[in-house]
Amino acid sequence: MLTTLKNINALPVRTWRRLGVNGETLDIEFPEPRVFPAPKPALPEGITRAHESVLVCAEFKSALGEELSAYTRVHANAGVRLRALKGRPPTEPITASYTLTAEHPALVDNNVIFAEAHSEITVVLIYGGGAGERGFHSGLTRVIAENCAVVRVVQLQCFDAGTRHFSDFSAVIANGARVELTRIELGAGETYAGCHMKLEGDKSEARTDTFYFGDGTQTLDFNYVARHLGRATKSEMNAAGALFGSCGKTYRGTIDFVAGAGESKGAESENTLLFSENSRNRSAPVILCGEENVEGSHAASVGRIDEGKLYYLRSRGLTETDAKRLMVGALLESAMKNVPESERERLRAVLGERIG
Amino acid sequence: MTKAPLLQIKNLTVAVGEKLILRDLELTINAGETHVLMGQNGTGKSTLASAIMGSPAFDIISGEILFEGENITEESPDKRARRGIFLSFQNPEEVPGVTLENFLRTAKGAVTGEKPRLMQFKKDLRVEMERLGVAETYAARELNVGFSGGEKKKAEILQLLTLNPKLAILDEADSGLDVDAVKTVSEGVSRFRNEGNALLIITHNTRLVEGIAVDRVHVLENKKLALSGGAELMRRITDSGFAGLQTNPDAPRGAPKGDTQ
Ligand SMILES: Nc1ncnc2c1ncn2[C@@H]1O[C@H](COP(=O)(O)OP(=O)(O)OP(=O)(O)O)[C@@H](O)[C@H]1O
Ligand SMILES: [Mg+2]
């Protein structure tokens, strides 16, 4: 059934329509997915399976859009449900890997991560493969980090070009807890990714690192929100990426200081390299201050890589491809802090091939 | 068998768009030689350097550029760099995101065909940076981004010393440098220079080449090397300017060293 969804990746507070960043309206043919074949990850000591009901105690917001979020919850055909037990030492990352195929072209994964107080957990979600125009992914990851817990989620996306890819992330973060999201978006034809960090507890922290690569006629659309509710909370949102061809990218980053969030700090940065005159690069950094005693900052840098810069690098012996790989590779490195060593080389290779 | 010159430029005519900048220019540089190129602003010195390096911004209308006897006129800049040609840019580009160290190591790997080992490379780089008076922290800074004019020039010389080419073209490597920095850069250039390589130094004054033995001096005027001579020509130009020079557009190429008349 074809559904028209409004307010995909909508800005929390609307701005001038002519900027074209308020949100997207999309026609989506939702698949009725069958169970997706994916091995259940082995769980180390200190981690058990969680029931979705653990989430009832928290109120999640969706940055991507409530309708999509609801679809993903109802039609999920995959996902991990994890509970990190109180006070246990950190374990190896827990990895789940999904590959789209002609037989299984649609992945809808609903992930739940519940970190009890003073626990630490890292989850790596790997997405790849494709099924031409039928390739579809909608993922939702909801996280509760109880007092002083640490949660790291790493999403590595290398879908084939035809794939439509939706990715939603929402976390509720308690006193002294920290949640970090890493997203490496290297593939898909259309990417819509949202992230909502709710810094509910005092001294809670959130961090996001996002890397994107766009070429051809790709669409990349991001909506990140850090909502500061507790006192002395901290958020950091970093995005970096490169645009080739006639792709279009929109990145929205909102730091929302709610009344009562005194002494909180939020910083967002975006670093974009433009290799093409035809690509469309839009950024909407927003800082909302409902509280006086806060510090919010944003830094955006857009580097136009023209023939002159490429010539300079080529005059030092680098081929044009070498030069592009060097520049874009540096951005990828900056986003891989939380990516397990074992995955980094593969991502570098995928990126290198996309540029070659 | 006599060895081919390191660089030989024959009848080179270069244009940018509709505008002719160099016409039938001739120049020969042998290994072991240092040449100085002078000329008024806008006469085409940087254009000549760009043509030798293979800049896509200029069109070679006619003529040939030979390097070690091989025709490189149509070659890409990266191939020329791998042959051993280096240009210190008059206006070095800023490259966001790429650190000076990572760039140098990648470039070294590109010209030698083998990426240098990280620890040894770091060590060597630190030594050279210290000699050039470049603070260690610059290794981790983005290439030329936010560098001052003088810092960019030092970074170019650092690249020269790291890549160790056969032919180094220095396009106003001394402009914008303070007195001490000119000396440091000049010493760096001297360290690079040996019997097997060559220099083409584009400059407006003699300070950079003090302490470097100059073999030939050329003056670019009217789209070609209108006058060539020995080191004393440089002094005459800095003392009394270009106006007093008797230029001879048909001066023979490859005249013996020191011959100015
Ligand atoms: N991309 C370009 N487009 C148009 N004109 C150009 C371009 N590049 C160079 N020129 C012109 O070519 C001529 C020679 O320029 P060039 O930079 O080679 O001079 P130069 O001798 O190096 O001067 P200076 O001593 O000031 O550095 C100038 O008139 C300049 O304006
Ligand atoms: Mg010049």
Image (cartoon, helix red, strand yellow):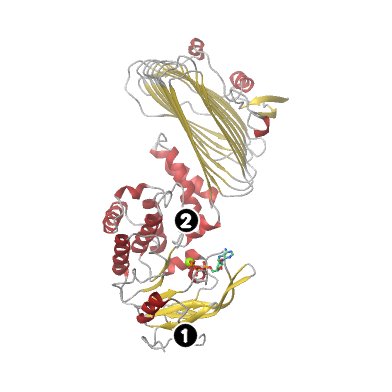
User: Which disc number belongs to residue A6?
Assistant: none
Viewed as shown, does residue B64 lie left or right of B165? Answer: right
Q: Quadrant of residue A12?
A: top right
Question: Looking at the image, is mark 1 or mark 2 earlier in the sequence?
Answer: 2
B75 vs A83: above or below: below
For label 1, the residue is: B246
Q: Residue at x 47, y 68 (%)?
A: B80
Chain where mark 1 sits: B
One can see residue B259 in this view:
yes
Helix, strand or loop at label 1? It is loop
**Amino acid type assigned to the residue bearing label 2 in the image:** Glu
> Which residue sits at x=64%, y=46%?
A246
In the rendered view, does A133 fall on the left or right side of B73? Answer: right
Mark 1 residue crowding within 10 angstroms, few (<14) / some (14–19) / many (20+) = few
Judging depth in this view, the residue of B78 and A310 nearest the camera is A310
| In-front residue for pair A270/B219 | B219
Check disc 2 and report the residue beneath it. B93
Location of residue B126 with respect to B203 vertically, above or below: above
Q: In this rendering, do the residues under marks 1 and 2 share a single chain?
A: yes
Mark 1 vs mark 2, foreground winner is: 1
Q: Is residue A262 above or below residue B254?
A: above
Which element carries disc 2, helix, strand or loop? loop
Residue at 36%, 52% (x, y): give it.
B101
The quarter of the rendered structure image containing the C terminus of chain B is bottom left
Identify which residue, A194 or B158, lies in the foreground.
B158
Chain ID, mark 2: B
Q: Above or below — where is B12 with respect to A74?
A: below
